[in-house]
Amino acid sequence: MAWDVIGMLALVAFCAGFFDAIAGGGGLITLPALVLAGLDPISAIATNKFQAASATVSATATFARKGMIEWREGRYLIICGFIGGASGALLVSYIDKSYLEVCVPVMLILVAIYFALAPKLANEDRRKRMGILFFSFTVTPILGFYDGVFGPGVGSFFIVGFVLLCGLGMMRAMSFTKLANASCNLGSLSIFITKGVIIWPIALAMALAAFIGAQLGARAAVRVGPRLIKPMLIVVCCALALKLLSMENNPLRIAIIHSFAF
């Protein structure tokens, strides 16, 4: 792939890292950008996973250094998240390319709708519906599987789950989310590496750019907040999804045209 294209994808990753640090959902931008750049869906998901995992593992290490990771309670999150992520990545490696070309834009729109309708979460603890242990063995493998198959938005899903189901305040929910998300990422990434589907020059460039963007985004988060970024993220996500659906070789577009023709 030409270096100018890699440079553009790195710029996209920088913006996604900036958005992700403020409102989450950076993968909603990077994944369709990779597909539009010409990568097949599996390579796009795998390459996107590397740059996402780099940022997530880095954030988890930061939380750990500050003593915010509860390793004893979270140890089963690590195991179940890793297994779920690896299982999802293993499945997507065998899915036909045409199915992924249909599913990726549809999933982007669904996740964008979730972001638009997601409940506002407070830092106060809520009523507990399940413990971390039960969450680890039930919800975590499902979200890990989703992360391996697709990925964007999984961090937000974990936060909502920890707050609404486990009754955690936002900071504890975020610390457990970093741990679970990192394990899911590493599980799926281990499969993608063995399958040889990661485009390394792009993955490395995007990972570095996303890291820099996330650092700047974290500094801007206090001043800007998610109020402005989240609507922008949703609009960009939907626009990219519609662009994918409008491509002439998209199987869903072809099926819709044929259905109207009859």
Image: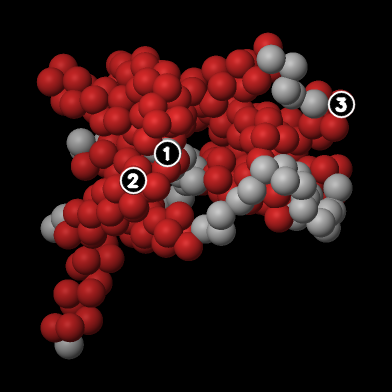
| Residue pointed to by mark 3 | 72
Which of disc 3 and disc 1 is earlier in sequence? 3
Residue 46, visible in the rendered structure: no
How far apart marks 2 and 3 lie (CA) works out to 37 Å
Q: Is residue 61 above or below residue 226?
A: above
Q: Of tags 1 and 3, which is closer to the observer?
A: 1
Give the residue type at disc 1: Gly
Horizontal and vertical percent position of residue 47? 39, 29
Q: Is residue 198 above or below residue 204?
A: below
Q: Residue at x 22, y 66 (%)?
A: 253
Q: Residue at x 31, y 25 (%)?
A: 14
Horizontal and vertical percent position of residue 84? 66, 41
Picture quadrant where residue 10 is located: top left
Q: Is residue 102 left or right of residue 129?
A: left
Q: Quadrant of the N terminus?
A: top left
Residue 156, visible in the rendered structure: yes
Picture quadrant where residue 238 is located: bottom left
Asked whether disc 1 touches disc 3, contact meaning CB atoms under 8 Å apart, the reply is no
Label 3: element kind:
helix
Q: Residue furthest front?
A: 223
Task: Please tell me how crowded label 3 is: few (under 14), some (14-19), or many (20+) other residues with Cα within 10 Å.
Answer: few
Residue 156's tag is: none
Residue 228's tag is: 2
Between 12 and 192, the residue placed more toward the observer is 12
Q: Is residue 185 left or right of residue 80?
A: left
Between 45 and 132, the residue placed more toward the observer is 132
Horizontal and vertical percent position of residue 189? 53, 28
Q: Residue at x 33, y 52 (%)?
A: 231
| Residue pointed to by mark 1 | 225
Task: Please tell me how crowded label 2 is: few (under 14), some (14-19), or many (20+) other residues with Cα within 10 Å.
Answer: few
Q: Quadrant of the C terminus?
A: bottom left
